[in-house]
Image (cartoon, rainbow, N blue to C red):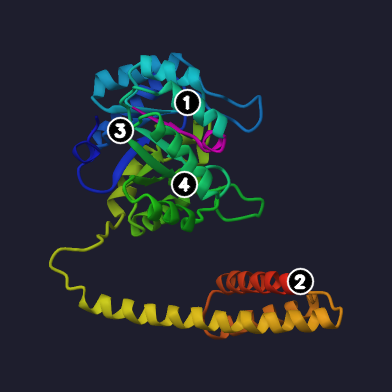
Amino acid sequence: MIDFNNVFGKRPWVIAGPCSAETEEQTLETAKQLSAKGIKVFRAGIWKPRTRPGNFEGVGSIGLEWMREVKQQTGMLTSTEVANVKHVYEALKSGIDIIWIGARTSANPFAMQEIADALKGVDIPVFVKNPVNPDVELWLGAIERLEKAGIQQIGLIHRGFSSYEKILYRNAPLWQVAIELKRRRPDLPLICDPSHIAGKREYLFEISQKALDLNVDGLMIESHICPDKAWSDAKQQLTPEDLQAMLANLVVRHVNPEGISLENLDELRYRIDEIDSDLIRLLKRRMAVSEKIGKYKKNNNMTVLQPQRWDSILNKYIQMAEENNLDKDFITKVFQAIHQESINVQVKIVNQN
């Protein structure tokens, strides 16, 4: 069994290497440079699940020979992604130390079950990336399949979520999803993959820092000796030198720093708890009024949804948010959720016999 605390030392754990193993020279040289900078675990994609055919889908099994060379020449642990049973068997046969399961695979319960069955009786760390869609239950289900197969060393990788909307990053971070899974399974280590969230190297630092501020255990970052010439995901990779510089600038915070009194923090938390309790009571009162509105609409044969009314309410509170230095997107989400629940209450009332 691998003791990650012994392997990595203090937080954050760092797993680094190219998106893809492209050539033996590129793989070994990247590993040597990363090892010289203190990286203990080398990552490289051998098989690359791609959205559309025709793109580079990895060098295949020959890359596993290069990974063996990495291990022999640098002493680093090696890790790669597996997407099916064949990948599992080949990775294990080649002595890969750590495997991870990608977002497309973790979203497929049938594929997860086949991989879990292939791993029965194997003592190897398995990290599970979040599914492409923000579904905590689906992510948790992938983990539980591995646990039922007897896998003892399971970790989580937060790599962001696909989005139809145009956003700054390649994948939407949706930190709350990772936080919720960590709340349910505090026993499992959680690392962040800022490369796949960012999509561009200029965003890697801010995402990595946010992840550390949220108390993740480590980072999986793509690093290539010549990123601009990478065969896959060129824009999101760093040179080993740039990776070292970025890591040096990250601030690592602690849950309970030694020698620090938490008295003032506890007082502030108590005030937050009081305000949150007030919010619950106010929401209860608001939904009681929504019930009365639902009865009025039912008695007068009115539609539940009144678009002009909702539009005016939302615009009003967005303006108030800006006047009070509150983020308008946050306020929009809050009132959309409240409005949807109010609609649910009213629909239930108008459909009562």
Q: Nearer the viewer, residue 274 or 65?
A: 274
Q: How many marks?
A: 4
Quickly name the residue at label 1.
Answer: 115
> Which numbered circle lies on residue 41?
3
Which residue is drawn at the image coordinates 81% and 78% (left, top)? 298
Amino acid type, callout 3: Val
Q: Which element is circle 1 on?
A: helix
Q: Give whichever of 203, 171 is nearer the camera.
A: 171
Mark 1 or mark 2: which is in front? Answer: 2
Q: CA distance from mark 3 to mark 4?
A: 21 Å
Residue 109 is situated, as x and y percent measured from the top left of the image, at 55, 34
Neighbourhood count class around disc 2 (C-alpha, 10 Å): few under 14, some 14–19, many 20 upward? few
Which comes before the other along the chain, label 1 or label 4?
Answer: 1
Residue 11 in percent (x, y) is at: 25, 48
| Sequence-wise first label, 2 or 4 | 4
What's the distance in space between the residues labelled 1 and 4, CA to CA? 32 Å
Q: Which badge, 1 or 2, is on the more N-terminal residue?
A: 1
Whether label 2 touches label 3, CB < 8 Å: no
Which stretch did the figure color magenta? 98-108
The residue where tag 2 is placed is: 352
- Residue 120 in percent (x, y) is at 38, 23
Q: Which residue is mark 4?
A: 201
Q: Amino acid at mark 1?
A: Ile
Q: Residues within 10 Å of mark 1 (few under 14, many from 20)?
A: many
Q: Is residue 78 above or below residue 203?
A: above
Tell me which numbered mark, 3 or 4, is placed earlier along the sequence. Answer: 3
**Upstream in sequence: badge 2 or badge 3:** 3
